[in-house]
Image: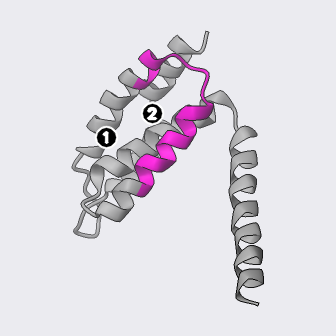
Amino acid sequence: MRRYTYFLMSLLLGSHVVLAENSLNALSQEALYKNWLVSRCIGKSTDLEKTKQDAFRSASAYLELSKLPMDAFEQGEKLAEQYANKNSQGSVQGTYYTLDCLSLQNASEAETIFERYSK
């Protein structure tokens, strides 16, 4: 009975991995690149090791599917670092690292890098 339960659990968990991979394959090259930027930024801005590792693993998944040259990612790494170190302020006192990282996907610098290397 226990073996059967483990077998079913592995099938269920494995199907989620396949679904996630298929949904990533449906993304455009631009979306893959911008999601990579955000993931790298979040990984660089957090002080929680678990979140950092998760963000970097996510970035790796996007990188694996990208057809852009490595130069695009080297440029993007610098940009992600800049956004991770921004010190945005809001009406509520505290940090806004996630806000800064999410704004990276709409940044003109990110668009410029993508356009330069996607041709």
Q: Is residue 47 above or below residue 112?
A: below
Camera-nearest residue between 111 and 2 = 2
Mark 1 surroundings within 10 Å by alpha-carbon count, few (fewer than 14), some (14 through 19), many (20 or more): many
The residue drawn where x is 27% and y is 36% is 82
- Residue 40 showing in the rendered view: yes
Q: Amino acid at mark 2?
A: Ala
Q: Which quadrant is home to the C terminus?
A: top right
Q: Amino acid at mark 1?
A: Tyr
The residue drawn where x is 59% and y is 36% is 32
Q: Identify the mark at residue 83; answer none if there is no mark.
A: 1
Mark 2 surroundings within 10 Å by alpha-carbon count, few (fewer than 14), some (14 through 19), many (20 or more): some
Point out the stretch of residues depicted in magenta. 54-73
Q: Secondary structure at mark 1?
A: helix
**Is the stretch drawn in magenta largely helix, strand or loop?**
helix
Find out whether the residues at labels 1 and 2 contact each other: C-beta distance under 8 Å: yes
Q: Is residue 72 above or below residue 17?
A: above
